[in-house]
Amino acid sequence: MWQNKLALLLVLLGMCQFASAQSDDAEVIQEIIEYLLETSEAELDFTDLQQDLMGRLEKPINLNKTDFDELKSLGFLTEPEILAILSHRAKYGDFLGVFELQSVEGLTPERAQLLSHFVTCTEYLDDEKTTLKKVLNGGNGEFMMRYRTIFQDQAGYQKDSMGNSAYEGSQFQLYSRASYKYKNKLSIGYTAEKDMGEAFFTGSQKQGFDFYSAHAFLKNVGMIKRLAIGDYQVQFGQGLTMWSGLAFSKTADALNVVKRPRKIVPFRSVNEYQFLRGAALTIGKGPLEVTAFVSHKKEDGNLSSDTLDQQTSYFTSIQMSGFHRTASEVQNKDKITENILGGSAELKIKTIRVGINTINYHFDPPYQKNAKPYQVNDFFGSNLNNSSIYYQGLIKKAYLFGETALANFKTNSLSSINGLIVPLTNKIDLAAIYRYYAPSYNSFYTAPFRELSRPKDEMGLYTGFNIKFREDLIMKLYLDRFKFPWLKYQTDLPSNGYEFLSELQYQPSRSFNMYGRIKTQVRNQNMPGNTSPLNVLAPLNYTHYRFQFRYKISRDFTATSRAEISTYKVDNKQKSQGMLLFQDLAFKPLEQPYSVLMRYAVFNVDDYTARIYTYENDVLYAYSIPAYQGKGYRFYILGRFTIKRNIDLWIKYSQTTYFNQNTVGSGNEQILGNTRSEIKMQARIRF
């Protein structure tokens, strides 16, 4: 053992660059978020993950005491990577330092460097007595304000001859938040937001901001594992019965398919739907943890009345946008009362966790609408129950996971997802998932692995591989084949399809990396222009080709170049296509209180069906993934400045100009002209 460790240490002595390459912590977290957004290509809310990673910077994980579940909670490590770390420790003994991560077989140098910011090999006191004085004086707080506006006038703000406009408020967005944390034990905070077009201390919003949220969160104090009061999120199992907050489905990281439930999480975002309001508690002793939660809040919705009994009302849909700008949006605000009562019990047996969940919903007024044929299996009424059993854990080198659920205890709603991740060789890792979601399975606040927007009327088999040809050459690919046993919107027959992705990554050095990606999705939909009395389906084919390379020009400058092409076919006939080229330049001088990021993009996209999504850097806790369509160019410049040790300022200016149109946007968002310009400013004070 010691001979092996000594030989390993001699090799690692030459890795001084690893320590010197540590970058600013905030930039590291941004790099992780950027990677997750780039691979998911979805509009996700990373606020809570960002907050958790910030907490890990303050209290890093001890590599020599950690286990599988704790490493998994970081959110960016795959199961095979975690196994590689634990196997290395078992073979060579305790880590001598974080630099030893560079020698872990199965970790790329890039991933080892990222991980090094969130782990340590140093002992520190964690069980010291917590007193009120320590809580008040030993924590960290921050206050933040953000302002955003569009320079051009939009139709919704134009006044008519009577002096009225479609939007009630002003053309700016305002965001405010404050929080205080003590280690990983206590978190309290509030968030407030006014969207563009919403009134502010006038009209229907005399209370100021349109949306307010607050929380108090306690963790790991005696038998209390988690306690949330106010606004919070709940995550259990594989997301089939309850999952609010950040959740991935299919991404370019073919092994990133397992949900990592955190049970109770404080809500710190401005998503006005994806949270619960009330109280939640997890208590535990030994291998058993029990959770109970209750929520009462108002939701926006469209109300209707019975044609025979005008006193009887019901809602036909829940509005999730959170916008209250127009008279109709204001009228729909807080029309639905949603009550939720739920619980979970989980038992840890060695490396396996098994549990049961149950969640009860009550809506007032009830949900009702004139169902179309594809909606006959949807939920109607006032009460809904989702119950499930789940498992997740490690058996030898295979990571197994799954959840099986019922809606309202009806056997015809039985739905299940089961999968595994396993290293086939030291160079090939496999992920496989089979899911079946019954047409009559209905749920809210769920986010399991799936193809459609909700787990319903779907069955499929997913297989994904990570293949390491060499340390600097990795291929990631997956194939997902799926079927929809019942009808869907614009699909009047049962249908099927598939999605395939292949990505080849090449990184010969830390200063240069490149990848190429092909992604194809095929679904069936009603044949356009069909005049036959019989329903006929036609395949819709979406294909994207991407090539990107990133290189360090110097110590302070990094450049990223990308080319992307999209095609859209109906019944194997070309309908539209798109092209995007962009160049990024990042200037991050070491030991300087500022950084600047810039992008210039040109695009030529026929229409919305061939649109191209691309992630953009943004101010802290904000994320931007614009959809490119039309013909033109777009650029942005983002600057971050540390005014003092505890004061940070971000400014982002972006502009899109179109060559082939005289207006931008539509409806109340329409701009007369071919340019849309936006500025975003944010300040943070830490105390």
Image (tube, grey):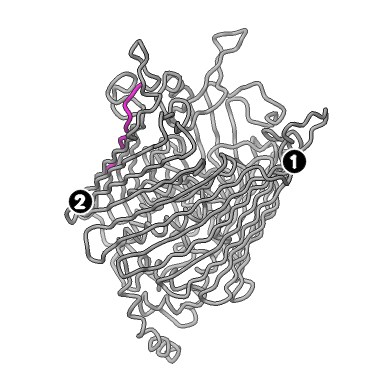
Q: Are marks 1 and 2 in contact (CB under 8 Å)?
A: no
| Mark 1 neighbour class, 10 Å CA radius: few under 14, some 14 to 19, many 20 or more | some
Secondary structure state at the residue bearing disc 2: strand
In the displayed structure image, the side of residue 638 where residue 542 appears, left or right: right
The numbered disc on residue 647 is 2
Residue 163 visible? The answer is: yes
Residue 177 on image: x %, y %:
29, 41
Residue 153 on image: x %, y %:
35, 28
Residue 193 on image: x %, y %:
33, 34
Quarter-wise, where is residue 393 in the image? bottom right
In the displayed structure image, the side of residue 339 where residue 21 appears, left or right: left
Quarter-wise, where is residue 199 in the image? top left
Residue closest to the eye, 234 or 31: 31
- Work out which residue is located at the far bottom of the displayed protein and give it: 3
Residue closest to the eye, 49 or 108: 108
Q: Nearer the viewer, mark 1 or mark 2?
A: 1
Tell me the residue at 39%/43% (across/down): 267
Asked if 368 appears above or below 565 in the picture, the reply is above
Q: Gap in Å between the C-alphas at discs 1 and 2?
A: 57 Å
> Is the magenta region chiefly helix, strand or loop?
strand
Q: Give the residue number, with chain letter if any, for mark 1.
A: 538
The numbered disc on residue 381 is none
Residue 637 on image: x %, y %:
33, 50
Instruction: Reply yes or no: does residue 205 show up in magenta.
Output: no
**Which residue range is magenta in the image?**
168-178
